[in-house]
Amino acid sequence: MGSIARLRELLTHVVRPVRDDTRRQLAQSWAALPPALRTPHQMLGRQGNGCGATIGAMPRCDFACRGCYLGEEANRIPAASVEEIKAQMRLLRPVLGHAGNLQLTDGEVTLRPESELIELLRYARELELVPMLMTHGDTFRRRPGLLERLMTEGGLTEVSIHVDTTQRGRKGARWRDAAAERDLNPLRDEFAELARAAKRATGLPLRCATTMTVTRENLPGVADVLRWLVQNADVFHLISFQPIAQVGRTEDGFGGGVTADALWEEVARALGNGTSAGAARVARGAKWLGHSACNRFVHGIVSRRDSGAVSFHPIRESGDVMDEAVVDGFLSRFGGITFRVGTRADTMAKLAGVMVTAPAFVARHLIPYVAHWARRLDDGAPWRAAWDVSRGATRLHGLAIVSHHFMSRDELESPLGQERVAQCVFHVPIDGALVSMCEVNALGRREQLYARLARGGATAETDASAGAATAVTVGA
């Protein structure tokens, strides 16, 4: 891009920090919600449009976990071609929008040839999607340098590493025999150091997430994982807890048994430092994406002091007048703004755009909001807290705690299940249409696609996306 064109792009960020097409898509997502879900807790249509995932990218997996949504035949299924996966991305792009969340997943995708992974990552970027590579992480341990190459050659900026005691196949007897989640924290340490080393070696950004399958057996370990996470929030910015559903090749009787409320009681207890007041603050920070029974989350800030003290603070607590005025006011004006794509100059231009396009809002709230957070970090000495942040003695890191509640077939076919499917925000391209991930998991849609792959036939997405691709105006 020439210097004049680049300058125009930066000026556009200043004039319109949120793209026009992003605003239109958010408005459509909000309008599609039933009135009961249009609350201040709802983020669909206010900040994002949901998530999409590939399927068939690599059905095979070299693990044999106790809870697995793949079918028994998965390891015998050939991967879909690069062009078929690209076609899926084109189908997802109009729904996910600019900087939309794309999970590159299905089995263990790092078993694909490295050159193909790089090609798929680059293509997602060309479509202005943000691909997150979903993996168990052991391939990075076995193949040093792979993560760095995916970053430098593929433009990878987001990776999610699944670690929990339900996994089977991890390299190292110490991890295979782990009985409790805290026993795996040294392995999590290894992944954190691997990510930090990759960032140092490449000089590039990398946002790491982790996922944990939650069962009746390891539910008490949620607190141990969260305590580890807040200590490593400089590199791990998100965790997705996923209570196991009875689908795929999950062990009989292993699925179910962990409700959303039970999980979030553990989350609140851990992040609230064991106090009832702290747990209540976390609970007041809860938000939804789509149906409240499907996706819950808390966005927060981890404060780490040089003294070693660590604390978690939700960004928006219901009932907090300042939080509601600033966060809700910001979303109404700048919902959809993203800093996950582009350079530091793009980020600075968008921040300048916030101040230029809403000067009264910024002037009215900036100093009071900073003071509000200073009191939150240290109510006894707020100005000392602000000073410590400014000089680096206290470091702040964003952290999102998310739970995804997938359904078994029985749950899906219930009235509530049908209501949830109608509001699904996690889609997979099947037969040229976007299908709820729960339907893919529980109603045999994955197996039908795998059967076509086994016969050597192209998936329906390849043909259907030819028309859909014409509707995608990249850079609009």
Image: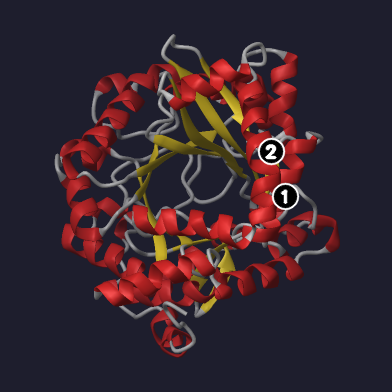
Observer able to see residue 217: no
Residue 131 drawn at (x, y percent) = 38, 58
Q: Which residue is rendered at x = 50% and y = 56% of the image?
A: 352
- Residue named by callout 1: 328
* Vertical side of 385 occupied by 62: above or below: below
Which is more N-terminal, label 1 or label 2? 2
Say which of 152 and 446 sits in front. 152
Q: What's the image's color scheme?
A: secondary structure
469 to the left or right of 214: left
Say which of 219 and 458 sits in front. 219
Say which of 419 and 188 sits in front. 188
Secondary element type, mark 2: loop
Secondary element type, mark 1: helix
Question: What is the quadrant of residue 207 in the picture?
Answer: top left
Residue 41 drawn at (x, y percent) = 74, 47
Residue 201 drawn at (x, y percent) = 16, 39
Residue density around tag 2, few if under 14, some if 14–19, many if 20 or more, within 10 Å: many
* Vertical side of 196 occupied by 5: above or below: below
- Residue named by callout 2: 316
Q: Which residue is rendered at x = 76% and y = 42% of the image?
A: 324
Give the residue type that dot 2 points to. Answer: Arg
Residue found at the far left of this picture: 144
Q: Which residue is rendered at x = 27% and y = 58% of the image?
A: 155
Residue density around tag 1, few if under 14, some if 14–19, many if 20 or more, within 10 Å: some
Give the residue type that dot 1 points to. Answer: Asp
Mark 2 and mark 1 in contact? Answer it, CB < 8 Å. yes
Say which of 383 and 172 sits in front. 383
